[in-house]
């Protein structure tokens, strides 16, 4: 009788289970998750900006038989294509055998991450130190960016159109860059300030040199830096006007913990979803559905601009596929399904007051599904329908994926948004799903290998279903 009641308790209730509990007797699954993480970490190290993430994604895609495609090019069943939008936003497309009117399976992630961008006139010198002025990109906690090793990544486009790629600070033999902070001995007044104002944006100036150029008339440290840049890259100070140079942490992805169960790295948000979206597409054998992986830019600043998810190029692509494959765009969109794959906040035991434990993402309990996001009264939320949420439940449970439901933090503690609403606005059913992150937007964020692997398995199940 007791065992009957125990059984009914388990049937009647919902309890999150950890990946390690589910696969307690299946070490092969745990090994697979750890192996998978290894390649993800290499991707992270190669992709610290959206441009580098696109370049690295194209290399992976081409190895799987994908080829470059542009608007106006032919499309036919069986094609594996990528559309490179300005080197900063990528669409991977696998054209299925099913009629295009039955819809497209879309997984949309973003590949930009919070960082410090150089201003157009960045270079100056002050009492023997040379600096670069920055303008932070996305939601950074400014106090976290001082006294950490920094690298400079990006492009300079010269007036004649020549592209100069810059990456300094990644190789062990490279120099790094640095943002100064006060010593505690003189930091008493600063320490009294709130975290948000102790390091103002105009103090995030990156130290780049201190050795004057011999015989320079003035600004000898600045001129020295410019001369070194000119020798190496052939650029002058005017070329910063048409550049996209980003200051990012000079830190490689590393295993965390005695058990190596976690990964610390820069830019998990949102490459921890972008990467499994790609690997799921590449390993999925089902060629009935037409599938698309979107790697979007500008999510961290609101998804605006020609490479952001609000750009109507997504409609141009769907229109083109519909026309080429004998469908109608409105019908294709109505029958499409989308996963907005972005990170959520993991429950943090040291700051439990901003979380609500029953509805928070818990580390190792699998990929996190968020029916809705938003702040306060769900402001700006996509809020997937219960029907679509139920469909996804069936898909994930059917494939044995370890997943959990999650809200980003306690009500009124804050909130966040994703690209979800920029897909659903086109009449495409969309739901948020992604990996839980600890210390999101920090220079060095943390995720779990188990949750990463379950994201890959979830996206594969979605493509297959
Ligand atoms: Mn994100
Ligand atoms: Mn973010």
Image: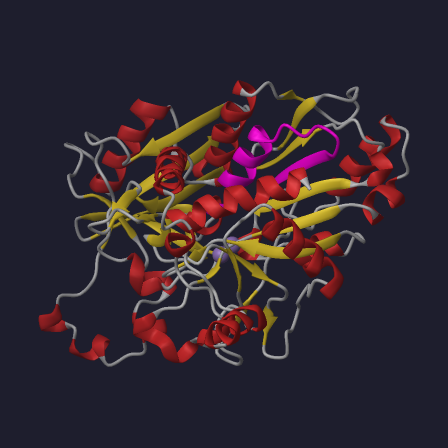
Q: Would you place residue 183 above or below residue 53 in this image? A: below
Q: Residue at x 38, y 43 (%)?
A: 26
Instruction: Estimate the x, y position of residue 122 in percent, counting from the top left.
Output: 38, 47
Q: Residue furthest left?
A: 185
Q: Nearer the viewer, residue 321 or 134?
A: 321
In the rendered image, residue 197 lying in the magenta stretch gets the answer no
Q: Magenta part of the protein: which range?
A: 272-294
Instruction: Estimate the x, y position of residue 394 in percent, counting from the top left.
Output: 66, 53
Q: Would you place residue 354 above or below residue 370 in this image? A: below
Instruction: Estimate the x, y position of residue 357 in percent, counting from the top left.
Output: 44, 75
Is residue 295 visible from the viewing direction of this image? no
Residue 240 quadrant: top left
- Position of the C terminus, as image quadrant, is top right
Instruction: Estimate the x, y position of residue 389 in percent, counting from the top left.
Output: 68, 60
Q: Would you place residue 450 above or below residue 362 in this image? A: above
In the rendered image, residue 273 lying in the magenta stretch gets the answer yes
Q: Nearer the viewer, residue 390 or 71?
A: 390
Q: Residue at x 24, y 81 (%)?
A: 192
Image-based side of 416 in relation to 2, left or right: right
Q: Nearer the viewer, residue 336 or 402?
A: 402
């Amino acid at each position: 009788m007791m065992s009957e009641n125990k059984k009914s308790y388990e049937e009647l209730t919902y309890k999150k289970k950890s990946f390690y509990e589910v696969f307690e007797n299946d070490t092969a699954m745990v090994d697979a998750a750890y192996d998978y993480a290894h390649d993800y970490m290499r991707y992270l190290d190669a992709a610290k900006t959206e441009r580098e993430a696109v370049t690295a994604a194209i290399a992976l895609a081409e190895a799987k038989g994908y080829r470059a495609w542009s608007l106006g090019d032919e499309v036919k069943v069986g094609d594996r294509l990528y559309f490179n939008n300005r080197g900063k936003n990528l669409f991977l497309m696998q054209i299925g055998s099913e009629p295009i009117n039955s819809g497209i399976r879309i997984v949309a992630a973003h590949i930009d991450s919070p960082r410090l961008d150089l201003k157009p006139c960045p270079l100056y010198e002050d009492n023997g130190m040379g600096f670069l002025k920055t303008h932070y990109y996305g939601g950074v906690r400014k106090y976290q960016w001082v006294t950490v090793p920094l690298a400079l990544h990006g492009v300079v486009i010269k007036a004649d159109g020549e592209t100069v790629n810059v990456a300094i600070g990644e190789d062990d033999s490279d120099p790094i860059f640095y943002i100064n902070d006060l010593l505690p001995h003189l930091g008493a007044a600063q320490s009294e300030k709130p975290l948000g104002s102790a390091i103002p944006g105009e103090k995030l100036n990156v130290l780049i040199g201190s050795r004057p150029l011999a015989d320079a008339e003035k600004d000898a440290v600045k001129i020295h830096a410019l001369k070194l840049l000119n020798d190496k890259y052939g650029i002058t100070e005017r070329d910063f006007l048409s550049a996209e140079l980003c200051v990012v942490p000079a830190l490689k992805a590393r295993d965390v913990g005695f058990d190596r169960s976690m990964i610390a790295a820069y830019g998990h948000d949102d490459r921890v979803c972008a990467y499994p979206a790609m690997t799921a597409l590449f390993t999925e054998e089902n060629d009935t559905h037409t599938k698309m992986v979107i790697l979007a830019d500008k999510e961290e600043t609101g998804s605006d601009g020609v490479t952001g998810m609000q750009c109507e190029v997504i409609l141009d692509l769907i229109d083109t596929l519909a026309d080429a494959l004998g469908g109608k765009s409105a019908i294709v969109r109505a029958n499409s399904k989308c996963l907005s794959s972005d990170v959520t906040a993991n429950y943090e035991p040291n700051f439990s007051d901003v979380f609500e434990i029953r509805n928070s993402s818990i580390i190792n309990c699998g990929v996190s599904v968020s029916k809705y996001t938003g702040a306060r009264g769900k402001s700006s939320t996509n809020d997937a329908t219960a029907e679509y949420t139920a469909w996804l439940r069936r898909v994930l449970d059917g494939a044995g994926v370890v997943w959990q439901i999650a809200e980003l933090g306690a009500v009124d503690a804050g909130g966040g948004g994703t690209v979800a609403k920029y897909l659903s606005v086109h009449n495409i059913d969309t739901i948020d799903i992604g990996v839980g992150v600890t210390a999101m937007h920090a220079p060095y964020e943390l995720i779990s290998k188990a949750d990463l692997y379950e994201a890959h398995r979830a996206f594969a199940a979605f493509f297959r279903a």
